[in-house]
Image: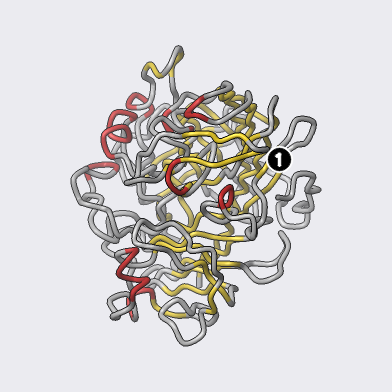
Amino acid sequence: MNFHVKNITAGLLLAGMAGLTACGGSGSSSKTETTDSSSTSTTTISTFSLPDAKGFQVAVDSGQADLFVLKNKNGVQAAITSFGGRLVSLVVPDKDGKMTDVVVGFDSVSTYQGAGDYFGALIGRYGNRIGKAKFTLDGKEYKLPANNGPNTLHGGTVGFDSHLWAATKVGENALELTYTSKDGDQGFPGDLSTKVIYTLGDDNSLKIAYEATTTKPTVVNLTNHAYWNLNGFGTGTILDHTLQIAADGYTPVDVTLIPTGKIEKVEGTPFDFRGPEKIGTRIEQANEQLKNGKGYDHNYVLNKHDITTPITTLTGDKTGITMQVFTEEPGIQFYSGNFMQGKHTLKGGKAKNDFRTGLCLETQHYPDSPNKPEFPTTTLKPGATYKTSTIYKFTAN
């Protein structure tokens, strides 16, 4: 794992003329005026409303959660709650300039808690699955909660998504979130001190920078679990979105979605997104791996890249909004919303979280790496710093 990665994203993110405020709610009108708390200037945003902060100002752990808004000079806004460090909204312009919220989410902490499925959340200590809910490190076996069949998913029964993160304003366009997981939390060793910074750039990019240190050898794999719909949340399925992933290989899984340990070529399979492909074109093909995942729910082994090279490109068919993903991670989990059940109402009472109405692109090290020595290591030791970044950049045409 890359633990001392230099920050080389300055060329991608412009200096922000943006503001961060605790969200006071923007009501239900189609035109919302938001004022930067650091100045007297006013930015007018049309055709959308951010969630009301009241639904997020509730007790969590031993403190109170809140909702924060990042803004850039183009009118782009990102709403983030300190409950689970969740990305609640990201509002970007479509091909006609209409401001469109591309994040599937809810209006309150209580709905996020009831919905499950990690909507928008920061994931830890270990994103994705650890097989048979255990791993061995330095000769010692650690047992974890089995919260996904026989396996551990996204850090266990009570992962980072379920806790209150301390939130601090950083500059004018960023939010710093910190959380410390104690030694033995969910079975993982060491006190893990974690810092995540969301930064909204004036190039309409959202950067997520992760850092962590530990007091004992442990395993770490942090990610974000946003559900994207580039046509706007609540507008239907993502099956007509076009996806491209710069990956010649992927990690096939067993029936419990644990990697077999092999890396197979995508060529000649429904997993080949090396060129732009509609997500729905091959998703129902008779294929053992699609059957195991009930669609796409697989880790892609990314081709050689760095943070300056987009490794995934997603485009909404109706809005023309394109999202490029840049990352320092070796893999990305493409999940096509196969377990969304339509039981919970989305923001503003607009539709429900129906089957395949959102997708996830989770940058990561590979699933079950602690039990797969042939995979890139996820071990973090005292004195080292886990450090990695991912950027989501938006354009439209």
View extreme (front): residue? 139
Residue 259 relative to residue 52: left or right = right
Nearer the observer, 139 or 186: 139
Q: Is residue 330 above or below residue 196?
A: below
Give the x, y percent position of residue 202.
65, 51
Q: Residue at x 33, y 78 (%)?
A: 287
Q: Residue at x 52, y 49 (%)?
A: 76
Q: Residue at x 75, y 53 (%)?
A: 9
Give the x, y percent position of residue 311.
61, 67
Q: Where, by quadrant of the figure, is residue 271 drawn?
A: bottom left
- How many marks overall? 1
View extreme (left): residue? 343
Q: Where, by quadrant of the figure, is residue 360 drawn?
A: bottom left
Give the x, y percent position of residue 220.
61, 40
Label 1 amino acid? Tyr
Q: Where, by quadrant of the figure, is residue 291 drawn?
A: bottom left
Task: Give the secondary structure at mark 1.
Answer: strand
Judging by the rendered image, the residue that carries numbered circle 1 is 386
Residue 326 visible within the image: no
Residue 170 visible within the image: yes
View extreme (bottom): residue? 268
Q: Residue at x 50, y 62 (%)?
A: 299
